[in-house]
Every structure is written in C-alpha cells, then in structure tokens.
Image: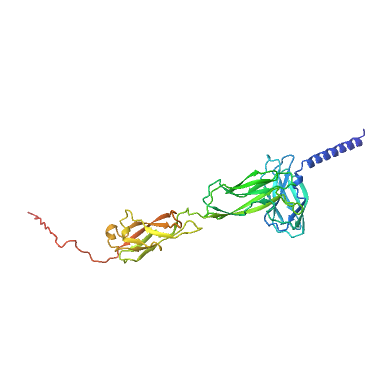
Amino acid sequence: MSTVGWHLCLVCELLVLIIAVSENVRANLPTFDEDSRMRILLLPFATRAGSTIYRVRASDPDFDHPLEFSFTSLKHPKLLSLEILPCGKQHSVCEANVILNEAVELDKIYELSLSVRDTSGGITTVFCTIQATNASSSATDSFQHLNQYLTVPENLPRDSVVDYFIARKNPNNIRGIRVELRQSWNFRIADKLAGSDRTNCSIILEQPLDFETQTVHILRILAVNAYVDNRLDTRNVVEVVIYVFVMDVQDTPPFFVRAPPITAVSDKLEIGKVVLRVKAEDGDKGNPRDIHYVIMVDNNPFAPFFFMEPQTGELKVRKKLVPLNQMVRSKAPFLLTIMAEELGSLINEANTTTTVDIALMVEDETNDPPEFNSDRYAVFYVWFLTNL
C-alpha cells in the first residue's frame, strides 16, 4: 500500500471516529418529556399575570443534574419566567414552572424557544407557540367545593383542617393529578385519591397563627394535570389562590406606650393635681378593648397619697405630700405600681392585665426656718480649775 493510500485510510478512520463520538454526544443531550414540551399552548386570554401556566419536564441520560431551563423570544422577552424546582442526581427528571408575567391578548400568537441545559453543557431547544383563546380562566372546571376566601381564628390548634376541596384530573393526560401548595410555611396540603378522575384535598394548619404578626395568608395552590377544556386550553397546570384571613382572639395583654420612668414631684402640689399620665394599648389589634388604670396598693405605704383616674391614666394627688419628707429622704425615689386592665367585651371573658413600675421623687420646697422640738432644755456648765 502506498504512503498516500495509507494516509487516506487513516483520515477516513478518524472521520468515522469523530462522527461516532459526535453521535454519542448528541445522544446524551438532555431531552424534554413528550407530553410537557409546550410546543403549542392554548392559553385563556384572561389568565392572571403572575400565575403558573405550565410545568415543563426534562431528563438527562447521564444525570448531569440539575438541569437549567430558559426561554428566549425576540418580540416578547418578558412574557414568561421560570421557577426551577429542586433537582439533584437522585431525581429521574427535573421540572420547572412556567409563569406568565404579562397579560396576553385574545387571538394573538406568541413565538419563543425553550431550552434545557445540563451541567456538561449539553443543550436541547424546542420552539413553542402560545395562542390566547377565549376559554374560561375560572378554576371551577378544575376544582369543586373550592372556597377562595377563608376565615380562621388565630388560636386554631395545629394540624386542624381549615377547609377542603376536590381537584379534577384531565382525562386526556396519562399522568395522575398532583396538588401542591407553594411557598407557605403555615399550611400544608393533604390529598387522597377519590377515584380515577379526582382527588380530595385538605388544607391543614402546619404552624400557629398570630393576628398581630400576619392578618392574611395567601395560599398558592397548583394542580398539575388538572382538568381543562383541551379544545381551547392546553395548560397542564392550573393555579388558584386562596386567601386565609386570621381573626383576632383576645389573647395578648395590653402594653404601655407611655409610662415615664421617673418623675419629680413638689411636696407643695395641691390635692387633685395631676402628677403624670400613663397610656396603654390593647395588645390585640383586631378588636381593641377599653383600658382601665389602677394603682396597686398592696403593702405600698406611698400609694394612699395618690389616686388614678381609671379612664384617662392620670395619676393625681389624694392628700398632702409633705409627710412624705419624713418617709423618704429628699429627692430619694420611691415606686408605685400601675396596672392597665383590658376590659372584657363578652360575658365571662377574662380580662388581661399588665403592670409597670414608675418612680416618684419628692422635692422639699418648704422654706420654713428651723425650730426647736421642745421649749425646755437643760444646760450643764463645767469649769475646770487650772494651775492649782
């Protein structure tokens, strides 16, 4: 064999090897599931912006996870966004939620491309078309017994069932229906199949509620492979939002918003004059109740000198304060305990209370001359003789 022929055979073998390797690499690219490629999506034009409209799924033969999904569109770059779900090497597929960012126009066609990339750099791209239809965007076809506005008391025990609904399966989809609750820490969904075409779902309280912390909880519920009219709607996810309003329960005591820690008081202050004012507010903001104030008298020798206006929180002088100069040193503080009482609005409802200590300091402003305690005194005179 000539040298030229030998080189020619070597080049041919190298080309065959390159083609084989290329085919092998191409075969190991990530692939979209056939039933969730979103090639042609019929979307109700009244679909709410910000809602999930599709669930895309892809797998990689080498498990080069996590897979990264992305959309590109020259004309509508902000139309969609993706919420990529957690995916590791132990997952057989990776998924992402397709979220509609902008409202669509009726009968308008939107073209874009959907790509998936694995960690090795392999990319697969499919072209997608979205057409807005006049199909109903109501959740009534996908859900039954659904109440989107719920009210629960804040003292509802954990693991209590808040409400329930039924999710219907799309008969044209071979996969079963799956109901998910997204981004909620206080609630969870428990579902149970109720037949081949539906599942019962219960909304269960997972964490305690607190009206003062959060008054409304927004539950974002996704039904994957839920029932839709496929003639005008080919979404494989239907999202519904449930609003849970928390009712305030009288379980938080009042708190003082104004209580001066120390106040100087003249011993010449007249009876009935205001020494200071305190103010407390109901700790339960939903239905605040009246607050009454009182001085705690028990074992406090200073309390009888003052009285508290129960409705205004004004501390006033009950009797002359001059005797306090004999009870405490001038400008030495003493304590009074003020209680704020939250009055119950219902029969047999317990009042809640809180207390605060305030310090008073009596200033001796009398300028009377010194005087003797007795009019008779004995004088002793001692004389020592010196130089005797």
Q: Is residue 11 above or below residue 144?
A: above
In depth, the one of 331 and 205 nearer the eye is: 205
Locate residue 75 relative to residue 194 in the image: left or right: right
Q: Is residue 380 above or below residue 11?
A: below
In depth, the one of 52 and 258 nearer the eye is: 52
In depth, the one of 2 and 327 nearer the eye is: 327
Residue at the left extreme?
388
Q: Is residue 276 above or below residue 203?
A: below
Display colour scheme: rainbow
Locate residue 304 relative to residue 194 in the image: left or right: left
Tally the numbered discs: 0
Tell me which corner region of the image, top left, top right, bottom left or bottom right, holds residue 376.
bottom left
Residue at the top extreme?
1
Locate residue 5 relative to residue 155 in the image: left or right: right
- The image position of residue 296, as x and y in percent, is 36, 56
- The image position of residue 17, as x and y in percent, is 83, 38
- The image position of residue 265, as x and y in percent, is 34, 63
Assign the N terminus to one quadrant of the image. top right
Tell me which corner region of the image, top left, top right, bottom left or bottom right, holds residue 322.
bottom left
Residue at image location 41% in from the left, 57% down from the top:
340
Assign the C terminus to one quadrant of the image. bottom left
- The image position of residue 37, as x and y in percent, is 76, 48
Residue at the right extreme?
2
